[in-house]
Image: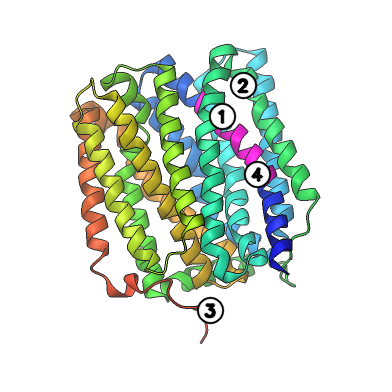
Amino acid sequence: MGKPKWFRTYLFIWSGQFVSMLSSYAVQFAIIIWLSLEYKSAQVLAYAGIASILPQAIIGPIAGVYIDRLNRKNVMMLSDAFIAVCTFVILVVLKNGAINLFWIYILLGLRSVGNAFHTPALQAIAPLLVPQNELIRVAGINQIIQSVTSIAGPAIGTLAIASFPISEVLYLDIIGAVLAITSLLLVRIPNLVAQNKGSLLTVLYDLKEGLRTVSQNRGLSLLFFFAMAITLVVMPAAIMFPLLTTGHYGGGKWEMGLIEVAWGSGMLIGGGILSVFKFESSKVMLINTMYTLLGLTLLASGLLPEEAFIIFVIITIVGGLSLSVFNGCFTAIVQIEVVPEKLGRVFSLYFSLAILPSLIGLLFTGWIVDTIGINQTFIICGLLAIVLGLAAFTFPTLMQLGNNKTIDNNEN
């Protein structure tokens, strides 16, 4: 497939995904604002976070196996359709009765189920369309698109929740899903469907193969380990950004929106850096540096006085940049190290493994914040992330990862 053709196809796919992500981000942020202002509780935000990721953690690995066995384009369309249908059902329920947390948690959980299939499938189609030497730049473009949604999504979500009840805001989810499905219907994506759809034993075997793909590659295993560790220590702070904004810095819904826009702006800058510059140095070195930089931003956020909101906004931009560069480099490394036929299960495995420590962090988030305070939570999380980022530089096998051509790590 020539470069102009693959590039046009990929951008067309992402145009639909952009609208879907934008609407989803707006709805998600509107829910966060509603929960934060309505309940002002770290525990409520933590439970919302758990509802958003627990289903994905449970079914993620199995979903990855099926993604590698099914048409990835169809998987994405069915996932979008599932999310739209579930949102519509919840919407009807909320319109006919009193709004309560139970239905909000259900909605977040159902979206998580759809994302368990959709996100790995989207990541796994890139190597089917994109030349290997362009993967890092495409990852940068992806970060740009995701960053634009991170900027515009909160603005749309803030405006929506300020103007309409939460039940009506959910319509954005349905509109985005319909447009995403339409864009996928109009393109052709190469298919790597397995000849044998597989019994349960076959699926379990393929799941084991996904584990072997990671475990037999020492560098990839270390990459997964540090990414999981960072997720564990950062999650308590990450979920509490709205409360830090309203509690410590005295902000409201518009200040919460501004912080999200700042984070998205940083991600946009990071994606632009990856897409414009072709990095010849180690991608892992960039990842480890971003771990450390992210930790520094969390540390500073907790140390700043309450009148330093503008500095907090600037620091948040840097934090978004660090996460964007990490995500782009991480995705490119996995796409280089793992053959396309196994990418679905490997990405699903990573998402699930990364989610498990997130759940641990979220379970104790309410207790942590109530015990030591919101500022101290950010300080401790930041210090731990800095230590992990610096420690990652000491593993030679990890530092060499991503410098080789694509290999199948399951060869006997």
Label 4: which residue?
Answer: 17
State which tag comes first along the sequence, 3 or 1: 1
Report how far apart the C-alphas of labels 3 and 4 lie in the structure: 30 Å
Report how far apart the C-alphas of labels 4 and 2 lie in the structure: 19 Å
State which tag comes first along the sequence, 2 or 3: 2
Q: Residue at x 31, y 46 (%)?
A: 294
Query: Residue 260 lies in magenta, yes or no?
Result: no
Label 2: which residue?
Answer: 169
Label 3: which residue?
Answer: 408
Q: Nearer the viewer, residue 156 or 345?
A: 156
Query: Residue 27 lies in magenta, yes or no?
Result: yes
> Dot 4: few (<14), some (14–19), or many (≥20) neighbours within 10 Å?
many
**Residue 26: assigned label:** 1
> Under tag 4, what secondary structure?
helix
- In this rendering, which labeled residue sits more in front, label 4 or label 2? 4
The magenta region covers 15-30
Q: Amino acid at mark 3?
A: Asp
Task: Check the picture and name the quadrant holding the N terminus.
Answer: bottom right
Q: Are marks 1 and 2 in contact (CB under 8 Å)?
A: yes
Q: Amino acid at mark 2?
A: Val
**Majority secondary structure in the magenta region:** helix
Tally of numbered discs: 4
Residue 182 screen position, x and y as percent: 78, 43
